[in-house]
Structure formats: structure tokens, C-alpha cells
Image (spheres, rainbow, N blue to C red):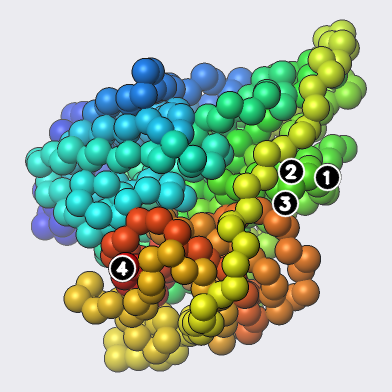
Amino acid sequence: MSGELIGRRRALGLIGLGTAAVAAGTTGWAAGVGSSTSRVLQPGAVGAELAAHPVLSSSTGLLNITLTAAPGVTLAGRPTAALGYNGTSPGPVLRVRPGDLLRVRLVNRLDQPTNLHTHGLHVSPAGNSDNPFITVDPGASFDYAIQIPADHRPGTYWYHPHHHEHVADQVFGGLSGALIVDGQQRPVSDIERTIMITDTTVDSSGYVAAADPMAKMMGREGEWVLVNGQLQPTIASVPGTSERWRIVNACVSRVLALTLEAHQLTQIAVDGGSLPRARSLNRIVLAPGNRADVIVRPMSQGNYRLIAEPYDRGNAGMMGRMGTSFAGARPRVLATLAVSGPTRPTSGLSLLLSNTPLPAGRAVRTRHLTFATGMGMGGMAFTIDGRRFDPGRVDQAARLGTTEEWVVTNTSSMDHPFHLHVWPFEVVGDSAGTPASGAVQDVVLVPARGWVRLRVHFGDYAGRTVYHCHILDHEDAGMMGIIDVSA
Ligand code: C2O
Ligand code: CU
Ligand code: CU
């Protein structure tokens, strides 16, 4: 076995892989197959019915689980060396309620450090709660205890690793899962589905492709765009059904501009926040990290494709200059809604939403942040306010109990999604003149050479955490800062 092969397998975190896959990998690498795009694994199943995904739900105030991060999951109907939690990618859907305690024993069976982040949850960033500074070494485990406040907003959240410099590799490798906070509100649909969209590239030997420096600079996009780990699954429905889709963009870098043929998507929530009222859209744009809860109402029989339209996040120009097409250049079919059978009588559900805006109140200060890219020593530098991430530095100090206005400016020629942990925000304005949605969210796409204006309320939870670009390659490259909120 060549040193290069061992190094590469180590880099991908492959321990305990089945013999067959190892043998295949040896052959592939010995033959010098190294390019991620020249040899993509043939999918094993395209168009299969969307399978039920494992769900772990709390009872009597507690969800007490183990999540084991390890290689060896089925993707697109094929066994692969990609990563998963408890043997699946995405990992199990976690369902909790406001006031619950979420206990997770995270077991690291990778060969690199990892940890766990509960993206979007308004919980403590300290100790063994949603603390992105924790390191769980290979072979080790860590016990998280995340107390969800009794007044937490119900909604669609997700979890993924957050160990600096390994985040993009591990999420692209397959590590992420949905995290749903159920509310007391009346059901708004007959049925509900979680639609976790991930992308990855698996080579013909079953290994997740490593990203080259150019892909990291652009933000890597995978050859496969998967729904709950399946390639172009079929979603079977009946005319007249009202379906709630909790859609999560868990891709490392890909912006999803979603359309559903012959249907409008009735959006009821942005990230974890309900909209004040439902809005019917032809297209919903989700940056990496964003979620959308939508109501889909198929009225007549037929097959309708859920499509990710081409979206140029600023990589088209650059890739064009290099004579290659940019990754998001062609539309991708994500799934097919197959509607058949007799029309079901409508169930008279109402779309009365319980929107909880941030408390009103004057902002005590305005903070300006700038996302920038530029040439630095050793290549492209990804910075916030001209600096790369430094775990020992506090970039923003805020006062507990206050409301602030943040203006995030992007001087670069690429879109960058801004994300803040723990404290959700409202987008109150942007350079494109988009009307405010009235919902709280936690990721917002800051357009190339544009800006967004946010309201953030630090009403609860003192502590230190991070804000960053949610193109995870950029985060790993240092497009991240630290905020410390104290009384
Ligand atoms: Cu989805 Cu800091 O992460
Ligand atoms: Cu987050
Ligand atoms: Cu970025």
C-alpha cells in the first residue's frame, strides 16, 4: 500500500472500513485514479421511493442518545466509505420539545477530531452545551447536555460537526442531521417530511473525494445532490394532500434555488422562525445552512420534479475565466413528487402561524462587519474585518440584555452566507431592497458587493461563541470570528 494511499485514507477518517471497500480503494489508487470528477461512483439506486429515515424523539422532557460518527454508510443506494452518525447519512432526525434536555454522547470513530453543533438552537454556548470550542479526539467520546428553554421557537434546525479546519471535510463526508423542535401549535399539514439536502462526491472506489485548493476557494460542490442520502428519490403523494416539507440545505457550499414543477411552494418558516403569514413562491433560495418549511399541495395526478435551478454565487465568472463551467451551472433534479390515486377530501387545516418576533426595543449600537477575500501569503485569504479566525481573540464583545444592529458588508465578488450561533436575528434590510420577512433566522446570504442589515437580541445566554461564513470551506479557511456576550 503506498504512503499516499495511507495518507489519503487517514485524511478521510477511514477506520474500520469493510475489506471489500478497502480492496477496491487499493486497486483504484494503485491505478492512479485521483481526480474526483473523472471517476464518480455509479449510483446504485436512482428514483427509489423516499425511505423513512430514523427518528429519535424525546419523551417526558428528555432525549438521551448516543451519536457515533464513523465511516461506512449507504449513499445513493451504494455502500460507501462516507461518514455518518449511527450508520446513516444524514444522521437520525432528532425531535425535541421546548423545555427538554438533549443529552448526546458523541462517540468519535473518525481519525480526526470532531464535535457537535446544534445549528440555530437558542441555547447556552458554554460548558458541555452548544460549545463549538470542544474537541473530541479520535477514539474518544463526549457527553453533551443541552437544555432547551421552555420558550424556544418550534422549528427546523440541524446538527453538524464544528471543529475548526475539519468542518467542510466532515459535512461533505456525510455528517449532519435534522433537529426538530416540535411546538404545541395545531398541525398545518396532513403529513410532514424532513428533506435534508446534502451534496458530496464519492469516487469509484467508494471514498469521498478530497477537495483541491481551487474547490476550497470556491467552496466545494458535490457531484451528487442527495435527499436524505438518496439520489432523486420519488415522493409519493395523493391529490388534495397537504404536505409540510422541512427542507434543510446541509450542503457545504451549494446555494439551492428550489422550484417544484407546476406547484407553488407555500413557505411558512425561514430557518427556525415562523413567518407572520404564509407566502406562496415559485422559487425559494436557500444558502448553505438555511432551512425552509413549506406547504406543498398536489392537486392533480402526475410527476413533478423538485429542481435546484442553476445559481451563480459568484463562482461563474471565476470558473469561466479558467475555461471550465462552474459547479452550479446545470439544473439538478433533487426528487420527483409522484401524485396518484383518487383525490383526498381536504382536511380544513388552517395556516395560522405563531410568529414570535424578537422583542421590540431600540438598538444600543450598530456594528459593522466586512466579509472580504484577497490574496494573502499562500493563496486566497478569507477574512472578516481583515482578519482570519483566531481562537484566542474576542472580535465582538456585547452586553447581555441588549439589542444591536449589525451591518454585514461583502466586498468580494462571491456571495457569502453569514451565520451567527445562539442568537437568531431579523433581517431588516439589504442592498437588493428585499422587504423584511418578519421572521427570525440564523443564516442570511450576503450578496457579492452587497450588504445586509440585521437586528440581534442578546436577551439570554452569556458566553463565547462564533459567527462565520457558512460556506464551510471559507469558515475552515478563517472566515469566522468570536463574539463574547457578558452581563
Ligand atoms: Cu451550521 Cu457555525 O454552523
Ligand atoms: Cu450554527
Ligand atoms: Cu464565504
* Residue bearing mark 1: 280
Mark 1 or 3: in front is: 1
Is residue 339 shown above or below 250? above
Q: Which mark is residue 284?
A: 3
Q: Residue at x 68, y 69 (%)?
A: 428
| Residue type pointed to by label 3 | Ile
Residue positioned 60% across, 40% down in the render: 247
As drawn, 106 above or below 331: above
Where residue 267 is drawn, which disc sits there?
2
Question: Which residue is disc 4 drawn over?
Answer: 486
Q: Tell me whether the residue at label 1 lies in contact with that at label 2, contact meaning CB atoms closer than 8 angstroms.
A: yes
Would you say 200 lies left or right of 26 here? right
Residue 458 visible in the snapshot:
yes
Residues tagged 3 and 4 counted as in contact (Cβ below 8 A): no
- Image vertical order of residue 319 relative to residue 191, above or below: below
Q: Position of residue 250 (x, y in %)?
A: 49, 48
**Quick one: label 1 or label 2, which is nearer the N terminus?**
2
